[in-house]
Each structure stands twice: as C-alpha cells, then as structure tokens.
C-alpha cells in the first residue's frame, strides 16, 4: 500500500517539517547562504577600503607616534615631513603608485599647499601651525601638503582596487569649470559673498544622473556619485578631528583646549573632494565612459 503522507512534510529530527524550517530561516531556505555572502563581501569591502587608505593610515601612525618617541632635537613638524617623504618613496618602491600617478597626486599636493599658505596668512588665520619647525614656507610646514596627497592617494587607489566605472558622467569641461569655481571660492569668500551652497547645488545638478559602479568581489554594485562624494567628505572630517586632536594643526577655538571641528567643515571637504577627484580623473579618463552593467 502506497504511503499517502507527502514527503516534504516529514518531521525532521528537531520536530519541525522541512517547510516550517524554511519558513523560520527566511521563507526560501537560502537566507543563511545570502547572509554569509553579504558578510564576506562586507568584510572584503572593509579590507579594500583600508588598502585604499594606506597612505592616510600610515600618516596617522607617524602623527600619533611623533608625540611618543624621542626625536633627538628634531622638530615634530620636520619629522612628519621626512616621514611622509619616506612613505611616498615606499609607495613607489612597492609599486602601489606609479611615477605618473605620483606626479598627478602631487598636483593636488601643490593645490592644497597654496590654499594652506593663504588660509594661515596673518590677515586670514583660518587655522595655524603653532609648533616650531625649520622645514616651512611662510607659516606652513612642508608636511601639510601630504595631507592633501593622502586624499588624492585614497581616490586613486580606490579607483583601481574597486575597479570604478561611471554611468552618465558629466562633460569634463563642465566639471573642470565647477572645480575651478570651488577652488577660487575658498579664497574669495573672505572678501566677497560665499557661494559654496550654490556650488554644492551645482554639484548635485551636474551629477544628478551619474552612478559610480564598484566591484568588491565579483558583482558590480552602484551608488549615486554625489553620495560617494558626501561620504568621503564626512570621513575626511572625522580624520580632521583626529588630526587636530593629535596636534597636526589648530583652529582658533582649539589653541588652548581641543574642541570638535565644526560639522560645517564637512561641506568644505565635500567641495575639496570634487577638486581632488577632477585631478585624479586625469589618470583614469578611459574609465569615465558610460557603464552598461549593473
């Protein structure tokens, strides 16, 4: 006589039917597998982000240790400059950056250093470098440019590590014009109306359709490029709080006691990321073509 009990309702050793177990695990029985895949990709994303932040991370290490190791009479700012040079040399020797990449990133270094000279000048004094040092130009220690290089290095390494591609990228001339306006506003807002919010509106308008495609393991993911700029700007602000706490530089309200950097600075970093991105894009022009895969 044929057993009339359906096979898929046979009680399991735990006392639940296979259907009931599937319902408890997410309905189709595949949730654990998808969860494991998500965790693997999430961990891989964190590791690759750490790789992209290698220059900045190395700089933070020397910034922290510079206050806890003997420098044998060498000024801390001078030590930071020499250490940053060694990090850059290591990047070249280890082939983490090519000479061409280093030259383009150094362009952002120069752009940032000129901004530093203006912002720390006696008539402006937006921030200051209160410690002594020989390796300075005017009021600015030479190591400060490497903090801008760290941003450029992150964008460049992330571009390669995550195999970045872009969909509906705006015309390069418009992006260059917007970047020039952003950079000039950092100077002119001291003497003329600050147009940063108009510039931010222009960024969202220019990149309103642009998606960035990134690959962590195998599957290409995407997100709005403007959102990526915002996230980078936010984490640079977090790094800025750490840097000022460690004495890399000081804002006027931090001279006597450290205080959190104003969240308004996030908008400044958001804008400066656009300038850095436009410079690094010179290295990766072929990747600015529309992406068709999702």
Image (tube, grey):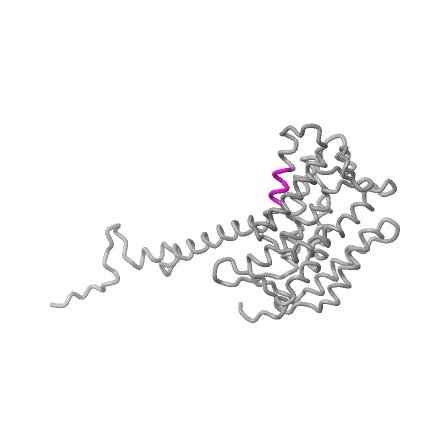
- Residue under the point 74% across and 42% down: 142
Q: From the top left corner, tell me how far across and down residue 163 is, in percent.
A: 56, 61
* Pick the front one: 170 or 117: 117
Where residue 220 sits: x, y (%)?
A: 52, 63
Q: Residue at x 71, y 64 (%)?
A: 205
Horizontal side, residue 250 vs residue 166: left or right: right
Query: Splitting the image into 4 quarters, where does residue 288 fall?
Result: bottom right
Left or right side of 294 for 135: right
Quarter of the image where the N terminus is located: bottom left
Left or right position of 219 against 131: left
Dominant secondary structure (helix, strand or loop) of the stretch shown in magenta: helix
Q: Position of residue 193 (x, y in %)?
A: 86, 53
**Magenta span:** 56-62
Q: Is residue 28 above or below residue 15?
A: below
Q: Nearer the viewer, residue 7 or 239?
A: 239
Quarter of the rendering containing residue 17: bottom left
């Amino acid at each position: 006589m044929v057993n009339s009990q359906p096979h898929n309702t046979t009680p399991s050793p735990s006392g639940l039917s296979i259907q009931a177990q599937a319902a408890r695990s997410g309905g189709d029985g595949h949730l654990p597998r998808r969860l494991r895949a998500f965790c693997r990709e999430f961990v891989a994303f964190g590791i690759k982000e750490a790789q992209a932040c290698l220059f900045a991370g190395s700089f933070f290490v020397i910034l922290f240790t510079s206050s806890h190791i003997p420098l044998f009479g060498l000024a801390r700012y001078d030590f930071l400059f020499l250490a940053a040079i060694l990090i850059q040399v290591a990047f070249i020797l280890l082939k983490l950056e090519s000479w061409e990449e280093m030259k383009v990133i150094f362009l952002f270094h120069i752009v940032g250093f000129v901004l530093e000279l203006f912002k720390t000048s006696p008539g402006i004094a937006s921030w200051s470098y209160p410690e002594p040092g020989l390796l300075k130009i005017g009021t600015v220690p030479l190591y400060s440019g490497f903090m801008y290089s760290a941003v450029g290095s992150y964008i460049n390494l992330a571009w390669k590590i995550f195999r970045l591609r872009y969909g509906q990228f705006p015309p390069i001339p418009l992006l260059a014009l917007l970047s020039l306006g952003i950079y000039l506003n950092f100077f002119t807002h001291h003497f003329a109306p600050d147009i940063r919010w108009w510039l931010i509106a222009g960024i969202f308008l220019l990149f309103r359709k642009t998606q960035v495609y990134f690959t962590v393991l195998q599957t290409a993911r995407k997100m709005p490029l403007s959102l990526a700029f915002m996230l980078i700007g936010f984490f640079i602000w977090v790094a800025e709080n750490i840097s000022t706490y460690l004495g890399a530089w000081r804002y006027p309200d931090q001279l006597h006691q450290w205080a959190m950097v104003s969240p308004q600075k996030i908008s400044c970093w958001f804008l400066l990321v656009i300038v850095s991105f436009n410079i690094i894009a010179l290295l990766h022009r072929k990747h600015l073509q529309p992406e068709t895969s999702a």
